[in-house]
Image (tube, grey):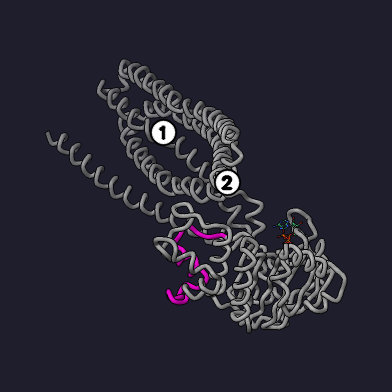
Amino acid sequence: MINVLYLVGAAIIAGIFTFLMRQTIINVSRYIEFDLKNEIYQHYQVLSLKFYKSNRTGDLMNRISEDVGKVRMYVGPAIMYTINTITLFAVAIIYMVDRSPSLTLYTLLPLPFLSAVIYKLSRLINKRSTIVQQSLSTLSTYSQETFSGISVIKSYGIEPRTNLEFENLSAENRQKQINLTKVQALFFPMMILLIGISNLIVIYVGGMQYMNGKIEHIGTIAEFIIYVNLLTWPVATVGWVTSLIQQAEASQERINEFLDTEPDIKNTAKELTPIKGDIEFKNVSFVYPDTNIEALKNVSFTLKSGETLAILGNTGSGKSTILDLIGRLYDIDKGSILIDDTRISDLNLFSLRSSIGYVPQDAFLFSDTIKNNIKFGKEDATDDDVIEAAQNAKVHKNIIGFTKGYDTILGERGITLSGGQKQRVSIARAIIKKPDILLFDDCLSAVDTETEEKILKNLVKLTKDKTTIIVSHRVSSAKNADRIIVLDEGKVIESGNHESLMNTNGYYKELYNKQLSEKEM
Ligand SMILES: Nc1ncnc2c1ncn2[C@@H]1O[C@H](COP(=O)(O)OP(=O)(O)OP(=O)(O)O)[C@@H](O)[C@H]1O
């Protein structure tokens, strides 16, 4: 009776401790997962555009979710089961040796083989699961790309083709998963086989020893069979845990590859450096590192704080590149860019970027309210500031026309703005910030000339004391600028102001006359 009570008591205590151990270790592993995810995300944020161009979104997302999950499995279950296994083995072996040392030896004999076989299997599993992981990355990258380009896919009616492509990628993935499952399927049969052999050895050797009188009680054989089965799971976990550890190692390697990637753009000035807004390009040449396209060749210009520069030129002539370089999205290797007479690389990166209001060519708005999209440029802006910025960008009337006004949700979950509306919200976002440097990258291209004129008029007031660069294809956006440069294939081919360029028979004058006659038509 007392033995039964011992057994029940032991089971209860084991239950309580297992619960406490799971609580502690699994919780800790979740905390580690949380920290790791944050660390990776924060590191992603400081990496430069080049990194994003050379790595696909699906891969970035997989490393932050799947791979981190695998590392968590190592920190949580792997450690927990290892502790379990060691404890159980230690206790069982003490009892087994006490009963019969020689029978213990025979019983445990197949176990190292089991571990070795499972280890081999785990290595194979690890190799194949890396292949599965890569194929999953490809699959998610593909789906993500097709979802974001869904309107193009629909308008070209190429759904069948994308379906087929997805099916092919899925089939590839399925084959890789099956290859993995085949090896995984060997796991349990292998275990059962070796445990069966252990049982047979116990019965055979135990029986012989009982007959020879080496074992006193027949019950010892039954006891050993219980031990063998008790050790089944721990031995299995040795293999399983090995595979977990190896997978975690592979995942951690993939994570470290990104964590060890140094941002190309380094902030060398730790102290904040207030920016006034003088900009000077001195013989700047720039080659895009990934494509080797020489986007700028020997470009020079000077712009005093508060002045306006307009950049004109054919498509692909390097206009946007100039703006990217001012925001230090890339570092140059030839010539120099000076902001307030200091090399751009010596300025504090945060000071530089926070003093710039940038309106990109293709306005990007988040799936959030219009108000928050505008406030994005200035977190502490009041509702009045938002309205004022929207009025100056000539988009206020459109916004109040929506039922929910400024609280209208944009993007995936909400309405889609027209190209011109998007551009104007994007302008409002830049001007609400009241930055020292304003960069407009062809951001009025989708706006009619009449609205363009009104916005430009407002901008003249707003940008009176701000350094402003306007990239455009229209002379109307450029003619009032203090300085105008015309680019062709990365070179400055003309520079001056409206009057001086109109006195030169060149690109500007030709463009002006062409656009004037188009207007008259
Ligand atoms: N991120 C990039 N990586 C590699 N090459 C690029 C990149 N951005 C632009 N280029 C290349 O650099 C050249 C200049 O491009 P840029 O975007 O500066 O021209 P742009 O004058 O602004 O053209 P558009 O008027 O069409 O906007 C082009 O040949 C383009 O293909």
In the rendered view, does 496 fall on the left or right side of 459? right
The first of marks 2 and 1 along the sequence is: 2
Mark 2 Cα-neighbour bin, 10 Å: few <14, some 14–19, many ≥20: few
Amino acid at pointer 1: Val
Going by the image, does 482 lie left or right of 275?
A: right
Label annotation for residue 456: none
Asked if residue 369 lies in the magenta stretch, the reply is yes
- Location of residue 141 with respect to 273 vertically, above or below: above
The residue labelled by disc 2 is: 149
Q: Position of residue 476 (x, y in %)?
A: 70, 70
The location of residue 39, given as percent across then percent down, is 51, 59
Nearest the viewer among 348 and 157 is: 157
Q: Is mark 1 on a helix, strand or loop?
A: helix
The quarter of the picture where residue 442 lies is bottom right
Q: Does the magenta stretch include residue 124?
A: no
The residues colored magenta run 364-385
Q: Quadrant of residue 199 in the image? A: top left
**Can you identify the residue that label 1 sits on?**
235
Could you tell me how far apart the alpha carbons at marks 2 and 1 are, in whole angstroms? 50 Å
* Residue 57 rendering spot, x and y as whole percentages: 58, 49
Viewer-proximal residue among 100 and 127: 127
